[in-house]
Image (cartoon, rainbow, N blue to C red):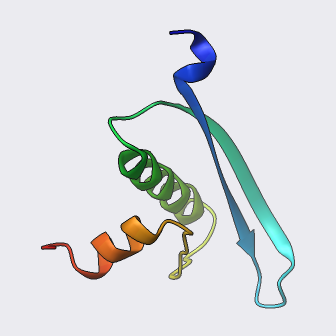
Amino acid sequence: MDLYSTIRGSGWVWNDSMGKIQLMGTRNLRRRESALHSELGALRWAMESMFQHSNCQSFGTDCKDLIAMIKDPQA
């Protein structure tokens, strides 16, 4: 397995109420046990990053499985 098959990229964007980009971040992460683990790790990193710059209370993701897991952790 080469290096490129073990690394995944993640990113986040902070838009203000007018939709203007205020901050953004990108990061390479090691491949996790599953895609869901990777998505959760990326969301956690985005949240930790945002809390350093803002009191942001709203986050989004395009991962349907992660959204379902957050809405119903027991499922």
Write the residue at 19% across / 73% down: 73
Closer to us: 51 or 2? 2
The residue sitting at the left extreme is 74
Q: Position of residue 69 (x, y in %)?
A: 29, 70
Nearest the camera: 42 or 34? 34
The answer to which quarter of the image holds residue 33 is: top left
Q: Is residue 58 above or below residue 40?
A: below
Residue 46 location (% of width, % of height): 55, 57
Relative placement, left or right, of 39 versus 25 is left
Q: Residue furthest bottom?
A: 17
Please identify the quarter of the rendering in which residue 75 is found.
bottom left
Between 49 and 44, the one nearer to me in the picture? 44
Q: Is residue 20 above or below residue 12?
A: below
Q: Is residue 18 left or right of residue 38?
A: right
Most extreme residue toward the top is 2
Q: How many marks?
A: 0
Q: x%, y% of residue 67? A: 40, 74
Vertical comparison of 61 with 4: above or below: below
Judged left or right of residue 64, residue 22 is: right
Which of the 4 image quarters holds residue 5?
top right
- State the residue at coordinates (55%, 76%): 55
Please state the horizontal and vertical placement of residue 36, each as a whole percent of the image.
38, 52
